Image (cartoon, rainbow, N blue to C red):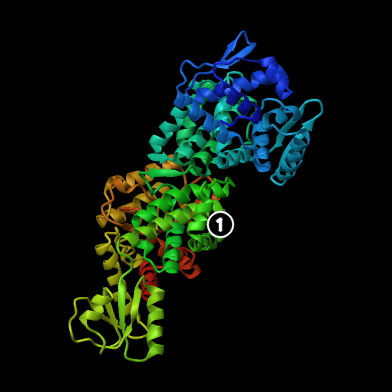
Amino acid sequence: MFLNQRSIAILKRLIQFPNDTFEIEELASHFEVSERTIRNDLESIDFYLKTKKLPRVRKEMKIQISLDNSELTKEDKISLLHEVERSDQTLTASERKDWIFIESLLQMTTIDIQYLMDLLQVSRSTVISDIRVLKEELLEKSINLEYKPQQGYHLTGNEWLIRREGISILSSQNFLTHYLEERILEKDWLRFSEEDFKFVGDVISDIEKKLKKIYSDNAYRNLTNGVLLSISRMQEGRFLEPVKETDALKNKEYTLLTEKAHKLEDCFQINVPDQEVWFLVNLFIEGNLIKSEHFLDENWVELYLFTNRFIEEMSRQLAVPLHQDQDLFTALVLHLGPALNRMENEVFLKNEILQQIQETYPELFDQVGTSLNTLSAERDILFSTNEIGFMTLHIAAALEKISMMGGRPNVLLICNYGIGTSKLLETRINKFFAFHIAGTFSIRELNEELLAKNDIDLIVSTLPIKKEYHVPVIEVSPLLNGGEIQTLKDYERSYFSNRHHIKEATAPKLSSLLTTDTVQTNVDVQNWEDAIRFGGQLLKDRDAIEQRYIEEMIRAVKELGNYVVITSNVAMPHASPDKGVKEIGMSLITLKEAVPFGDVESDRVQIVICLAAVDSTSHLHALQALVDYLNDEPFMKLLTSGSSKEEIIEYINEEDMHAE
């Protein structure tokens, strides 16, 4: 809790002289405020002591006060005094503006300048200056801080934007987050009790359990405060504007929160319309996660591909095979999913150790930022420095993991063409592989002593080496052709998966998944359910899935809506791997007539791709290739112009061959 400077000074006196008594009138005179103001300060001090599980201030006939010394140990006094002294600091202008906004958000009526002067412990001119700057900043966000003569200030404008600003401030200012918790528990404010607070916490915990996710402690606190903040605004009659076409995407969070809305209505005697449910849905999908049992959730395609592209880009820049680290992929998915939602809704999470990250990993921080913002440009999203800092930590941890396992393989080059050719070969190797080039030598210099001295793992040579050594030899041309690159990739994969025990999933090509058995064209179906059954049956016939996986794909669409429509005219039904997937599988069917997968015309689909994944990463190579094809105009024309499945498969096979 934040105490104003006057309250801190009073509490210091009580701690240092716990057996003395002080008259309220005396304190009011000393601080040049009213006795009522001192009593308000004492209430704040009481609440502060309560949060520390310490005895409250003793009041005698409401005239004299002292600190109850009977339960205070010497250690309690020392610890409390140190903590209070650390709290004795002046708020910055930015913190004062944030506080003024939150107060405006919480107050059932207007707030006046005197109230803010007492709260912030600053002069009238300072409060007026803060308000003037705050009003200008809010106007840029289409929010008004209006003044009513003889009354005070209050917020007007779009309720969604007002609450969004409040959530953003609470997410970035920890002291205000705790302050909100305290305010909502005050007996005279909105009549929220500790039982109400616990009830909301139980609702969130139950949703968390059913989602099979675990939120971080900060995210859980933000969810609790966000829900209570929304309830308080609804109690004041401040509702969000109705949202059009909210049925466009009914995810798991929406389904669960719709159910919980009825309990909130009964508990708090309010009406929770659909647009309020959607506001709460956004809070849940923005919260940072620690764990999640299911990664193949609705809307996962873009997230997985973004994560995969980011890892591949960082692997290329750092010349380290980060793409082979499944733990890194999982961690980034957990972070990026909520992060992308936060940025789309302009909610900013404060990174408490951002400065340390920038000082410790300056180059890596810049590389991560450049990669992220290059990839996110197509979504019109800009990663904040705080989010870049979080992502930098993930990459730094993965690099540390590889470093602890022995680093990159040491490679010795043997080249018989001269320095120009040897440098070309070295450049080509550095472009494609995470190798450490220990040096270039002639075949005459090659011996076991040289290999041992440089701790060599592999010899790459441009000429045949007949003698056998204790490390493998791979013969290549200076330009490295496709077959030679593949041989070196096989070695790299083996090195990191065997020596460093990094989990590596099998990565089948798209051409191995979409074959004559799993592609069908001009299929005649009555509705979307028939389309999923047809595509699912192709996978079942190949023994990639069980029958229950087909039923699960259908159930998901019925319960969650048309989230499977990933782009215009294309649907990609899927379900969790534990619902009957035996091996990676993908089927593609084109329909004779497009069928609707939702309530709007844009959800009519003619191309249905059923996906069965065994884990989070092994399907990504093929999925990335498929998405590239879906953005390829000739390929899409092939799918929609009545072409045969043989023509489609031939196109995919030719492209895969060119990509090798």
**Most extreme residue toward the bottom, as rendered?**
417
Residue under numbered circle 1: 379
Tell me which residue sits at (66%, 43%) in the image: 94
- Residue 377 screen position, x and y as percent: 56, 60
- In the displayed structure image, the side of residue 241 where residue 68 appears, left or right: left
Task: Looking at the picture, tell me which residue is in the foreground, 8 or 443.
Answer: 8
Task: Looking at the picture, tell me which residue is in the foreground, 203 or 657.
Answer: 203
Task: Looking at the picture, tell me which residue is in the foreground, 137 or 37.
Answer: 37
Q: Quadrant of residue 158?
A: top right
| The N terminus sits in image quarter | top right
| The C terminus sits in image quarter | bottom left
Q: Is residue 59 visible?
A: yes
**Vertical relation: 473 (above or below) 612:** below
- Residue 454 screen position, x and y as percent: 28, 76
**Vertical relation: 93 (above or below) 185:** below
- In the displayed structure image, the side of residue 129 where residue 590 appears, left or right: left
Tell me which residue sits at (41%, 84%) in the image: 424
**Most extreme residue toward the right, as rendered?**
149
- Packing grade of label 1 (10 A; few <14, some 14-19, many >=20) is few
- Residue 409 screen position, x and y as percent: 30, 70
**Vertical relation: 573 (above or below) 123:** below
- Residue 218 screen position, x and y as percent: 48, 39
**Vertical relation: 194 (above or below) 405:** above
Task: Looking at the picture, tell me which residue is in the foreground, 518 or 582.
Answer: 582
The amino acid on which the numbered mark 1 sits, given as a three-letter code, is: Arg
Q: Quadrant of residue 410?
A: bottom left
**Most extreme residue toward the top, as rendered?**
61
Tell me which residue sits at (66%, 41%) in the image: 92
Q: Is residue 594 visible?
A: no
Q: What SS does tag 1 mark?
A: helix
